[in-house]
Image (cartoon, grey):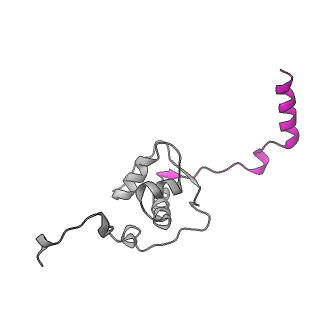
Amino acid sequence: MTTEDVWYDAEAGPLVRLYALTGGRAEVPAGDFTLNAIVQRVPESRPGGELSHEQQTIVGLIDRPVSVSEIAARLGLPLGTVRVILSDLRDAGLVAVPRGRDAAEVPTMNQLQRLLAGLNSL
């Protein structure tokens, strides 16, 4: 069989194995990039080196905050692979997962009731 006889289609699957996209890595630190974590581009960030096609696609997808699961769905890649790629982008300073509110920052029930009472009095 010559190289002219070989052809690929969508059913053949990816031409690059997933472990090649991640350099053989399969895990990121626990708690990083959970299924519903929201990822956003770091303002004013500029890629320092060459980005892979997948990294460029992710950076292009996050013009607005996007969940990890949505990124994986749009790329058609497994979550584990996307998490490793996102970890690399975070290490390069290109993406971040905004920190959630601390319990001290969340309004108390008393504050919410006073707010509701104030709104009702309007």
Q: Position of residue 76 (x, y in %)?
A: 41, 60
Q: Residue at x 57, y 60 (%)?
A: 35
Q: Nearer the viewer, residue 74 or 99?
A: 74
Q: Is residue 27 left or right of residue 115?
A: left
Residue 28 magenta: no
Can the viewer see residue 28? Answer: yes
Q: Residue at x 53, y 45 (%)?
A: 65
Q: Is residue 46 left or right of residue 64?
A: left
Q: Position of residue 33 (x, y in %)?
A: 56, 60
Where does the N terminus fall, quadrant-wise?
A: bottom left
Query: In the picture shown, does residue 122 fall above or below 46?
Result: above
Q: Position of residue 118 (x, y in %)?
A: 85, 27
Residue lying furthest front: 11
What stretch of residues is rendered in magenta? 93-122
Residue lying furthest top: 122
Q: Nearer the viewer, residue 15 or 90?
A: 15
Q: Is residue 122 left or right of residue 46?
A: right
Q: Residue at x 52, y 57 (%)?
A: 69
The answer to which image quadrant residue 25 occupies is bottom left
Q: Position of residue 45 (x, y in %)?
A: 45, 46
Query: In the picture shown, does residue 52 fall above or below 40?
Result: below
Query: In the picture shown, does residue 5 fall above or below 63?
Result: below
Can the viewer see residue 15? Answer: no
Residue lying furthest bottom: 1
Where does the C terminus fall, quadrant-wise?
A: top right
How many callouts does the rendering have?
A: 0
Residue 115 magenta: yes
Q: Residue at x 49, y 67 (%)?
A: 80
